[in-house]
Amino acid sequence: MLKYMLKRLVNAFVVLFIIATATWFLMQLLPGSPIQNAEKLTDEQEAQVGEQYNLDKPLPVQYGLYMVGLAHGDLGDSYQFGGKPVTEILMQRFPVSAFLGTQAIIVGVVVGLLLGVIGALKQNTIWDSAAAFLAVLGVSVPDFVLAPLAQYWLGLKLGIFPIAFFESWWHSVLPSLVLSTVIAAVIATFTRTEMLEVLGQDYVTLAKSKGLSRLAVILRHVLRNSLIPLVTILVPLTAALITGTLIVETVFSIPGIGEQFVRSIFDKDFPIIMGTTLLYAFFFVASYLLQDFLYGIIDPRIRVAGHKE
Amino acid sequence: METTNRQITLTPELFEPAQRSTQEAEKITGAPTGFWSDAWRRLRRNRIAVVAGAVILLVLVLAFGGPWLTSYTPTGQDLTRQYTEPSLSGFWFGTDQFGRSMFDRVWVGTRVSLYIAALVTAMDIFVGMSYGALSGYYGGRVDNIMQRIVEILVGVPILVVAVLTMLILKPGILSLTIAIGLTGWTSSARLIRGQVLKLKEQEFFLASRSLGASTFRLISKHLLPNVFYIVIITLMYTVPTAVFFEAFLSFIGLGIQPPDASLGALISDGAHQMRFYPFLLIYPALVLCLITVGFRLLGDGLRDALDPRMRK
């Protein structure tokens, strides 16, 4: 097990390194000069600015410097915020995104579980169909449609929620709700399928025949066993959250990492784009790794077979 | 099952010894139902899938024929009629800030979105299918290397790849297709590889191989037809994903540039003016949702019809 984990860990680092290298070279291909108003600067000034950001050095040296910095957790300096370190900017904004994400996960899991359980217990009734329909809507209606609509109906028309900025907890409710829809939908579909499978198992019949109450059977025997494979949706969930925060933070003007990423695209702030890409890739790879490890711990049978399919 | 209650008197004359040979007994009476007609029958019985299919068909027809229903053009500007509210007698979906008919713009935008989705899906199927089939067919070291490559590609969020690609290429239909299709094929490649690995172990494959069939024949005649149904199911899920990513990229300003329209570009414009003119957002958003929901539900129906064991 330890050997397997180590192998996966090394693998993950290799993947991250390749992603970092590929992104770095992609960055060199980007059109336009990172130095703003480059036309107005004299050659000397341009050279000075270039020197500040190591832009005067040959590409292999620049690459080497970036990689050495990366190994020390230094993502370079931002072009637009007067040379502020990218790491510092991202660290400042990270808590906001993390808060939104966590809140969305909590809401999404609770709602998703509820819908899934309803769907499974009332299989093939109107309740089941309603839950399934909500789940399909949750997956299919994109955040960038839902967010403006939520702003319009709940924010403007009904005036319940503020429609932008991030000043109090109340401001975070609407964005979190929008963000949680995909999570809730994924979990609902998943829970329903798994529960239906578990409901047909012999041990559930046994639990029922022992005379346990319906609630105890469902909570202790059915739900608990259906949730084990929940780790499989860890990766799609991470992906959904990253995409979600990009949109939701932009629409609601929330100072998180996603909003900074979208803005940096237009400001041609390459170090920030690069740093954010790496941060996202890190979370992605980490969630893959975590999923694999959890598999191995929860169900040792999958460990070997899982990678052979 | 019908049960007959008629009383029949049985006399020995009614009976004669059975003289059918074993071969005759094996004969199949009635036309055999093939895999596809069977699937079609199951699909038609699925009401949700039929409705979803009808909705998709309607959207397709409107995307290509919609603009002809009005006397306006999607780019015809007239500042005297800007921000007209939608009405049955005038502009069905209203007009935007340049007085352009939203009805026409929405359907032309839908056409662009669907066009990109179709290109992405074709790319997804072509690359994913050949990659997965080759990887699964050769197995061993080739498979190992090919899977490592996929692992790296999967490690990068598809969205980030799309954004970076759009930054490098000039915004347009082709660059959008490349940006979305670049990593999207990995999931279908994985699915097909898994299926090929399974098929490779089966007798019919071994039989063909022992008869000396070439690699090309083995893949094209025996493997691909058997994974074709997976391709169709994947296709149904790829289309909404592609529409989604196109809309997302256009939404953050990296997609289709004005005066051209796509659903994402229209939604983005609409979201900015939603406060006073909500209809600018609602119609394109509605069409987008119809497409994504429709394809997903049809995809579920097709999955159940083509692979009844996967039914959930």
Image: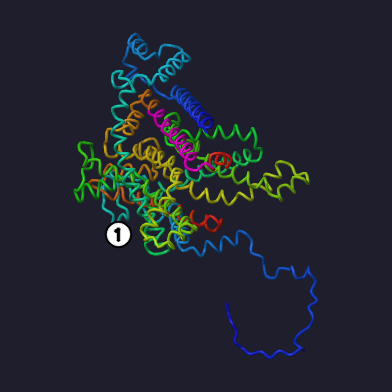
Residue most toward the top? A44
In x, y percent, where is residue A192? 42, 54
Is residue A255 or residue B99 the one in the foreground?
A: A255
Label 1 resides on the chain identified as B
Is residue A61 or residue A279 the one in the foreground?
A: A279
User: Is B48 covered by the magenta stretch?
Assistant: no
Image mark count: 1
Confirm whether residue A159 shows in the render: yes
Q: Residue at x 47, y 45 (%)?
A: B117
In x, y percent, where is residue B196? 63, 45
Residue most toward the front? A210
Color encoding of the figure: rainbow
In x, y percent, where is residue A66? 42, 18
Residue B285, compared with residue A30, is above or below; it is below
Residue most toward the left? A159
Instruction: Bin the neighbour count of mark 1 within 10 Å (Cα to Cα): few under 14, some 14-19, many 20 and up.
Output: few
Q: Is residue B61 left or right of residue A100?
A: right
Is residue A4 or residue B13 the one in the foreground?
A: A4
Q: Quadrant of residue A267?
A: top left
In x, y percent, where is residue B242? 45, 43
Question: What is the quadrant of the C terminus of chain A in the image?
Answer: top right
Residue A194, compared with residue A293, is above or below; it is below
Q: Is residue B100 left or right of residue A64?
A: left
Q: Which residue is mark 1?
A: B89
What range of the chain is rendered magenta? A276-300
- Which amino acid lies under the numbered mark 1 shown in the image of this protein? Ser
User: Is A290 covered by the magenta stretch?
Assistant: yes
Confirm whether residue A136 shows in the render: no
Q: Give the structural element (helix, strand or loop) at label 1.
A: loop
Residue B134, compared with residue A215, is above or below; it is above
